[in-house]
């Protein structure tokens, strides 16, 4: 059983446009507009402000400078399945940023890690000192 969605996408805020799919597929691909472009305006959406900010902060090439997330779905043969796939992928993106990132807590290196680092440095130093000229 799937967990309930924290921030479900309102389909009224999503704009769909049908396009022709790319790639091999024969007559169906050449004649039928089964692929779907999904456009989701992040700024104008009803999502909470912190979710909007995290979405806009993503370094994702699918988000335009105007703050519109564009997804292209062309996996399936029918437009309805591609539309459902695009909506599911949009929900995945929103769910991925819905949990705030954990704050990083600075820690000190352990005693053992400091000893290993110093041992490695002294070994490297002895290797380099052997590279010098030999005194007879």
Image (spheres, rainbow, N blue to C red):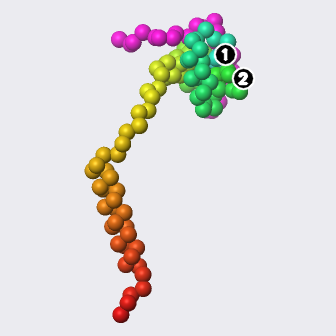
Q: Circle 2 is placed at which residue position? A: 66
Tell me which segment is drawn in magenta. Answer: 1-27
Furthest residue to the right?
A: 66
Q: What residue is shown at x 46% (from left), y 11% (from top)?
A: 5
- Identify the residue at horizontal 47%, vertical 26% (top origin): 101
**Residue 85 place in picture, x, y as percent:** 54, 18
Residue 36, quarter of the rendered image: top right
What secondary structure prevails in the magenta region? Answer: loop
Residue displayed at 35% across by 72% down: 126
Expressed as whole percent of the image width and height from the top left, the position of residue 70 reads 65, 23
Residue 42 position by quadrant: top right
Give the CA separation, mark 1 to mark 2. 9 Å
Disc 1 secondary structure class: loop
**Where does the image place residue 110, in percent across and percent down from the top left?**
30, 46
- The answer to which quarter of the image holds residue 90 is top right
- The tag on residue 43 is 1
* Residue 16 in sight here: no
Quadrant containing the N terminus in the rendered view: top left
Depicted 77 relative to depicted 4: above or below: below
Q: Quadrant of the C terminus?
A: bottom left
Disc 2 is placed on an element classified as loop
Quick one: label 1, few (<14), some, or many (20+) residues within 10 Å? some
Whether residue 79 is visible here, answered yes or no, is: yes
- Label 1–label 2 contact, CB within 8 A: yes
Is residue 111 magenta-colored?
Answer: no
Q: Tag 2: Cα neighbours inside 10 Å, few (<14), some, or many (≥20)?
A: few
Residue 4 counted in the magenta span: yes
């Amino acid at each position: 059983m799937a967990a309930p969605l924290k921030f479900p996408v309102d389909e009224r805020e999503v704009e769909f446009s049908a396009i022709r799919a790319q790639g091999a597929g024969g007559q169906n691909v050449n004649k039928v507009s089964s692929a779907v472009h999904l456009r989701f305006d992040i700024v104008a959406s009803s999502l909470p402000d912190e979710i909007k900010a995290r979405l806009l902060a993503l370094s994702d090439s699918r988000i335009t400078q105007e703050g519109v997330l564009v997804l292209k779905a062309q996996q399936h043969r029918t437009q309805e399945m591609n539309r459902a796939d695009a909506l599911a992928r949009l929900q995945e993106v929103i769910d991925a940023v819905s949990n705030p990132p954990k704050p990083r807590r600075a820690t000190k290196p352990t005693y053992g890690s400091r000893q290993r680092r110093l041992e490695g440095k002294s070994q490297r130093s002895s290797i380099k000192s052997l590279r010098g000229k030999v005194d007879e």
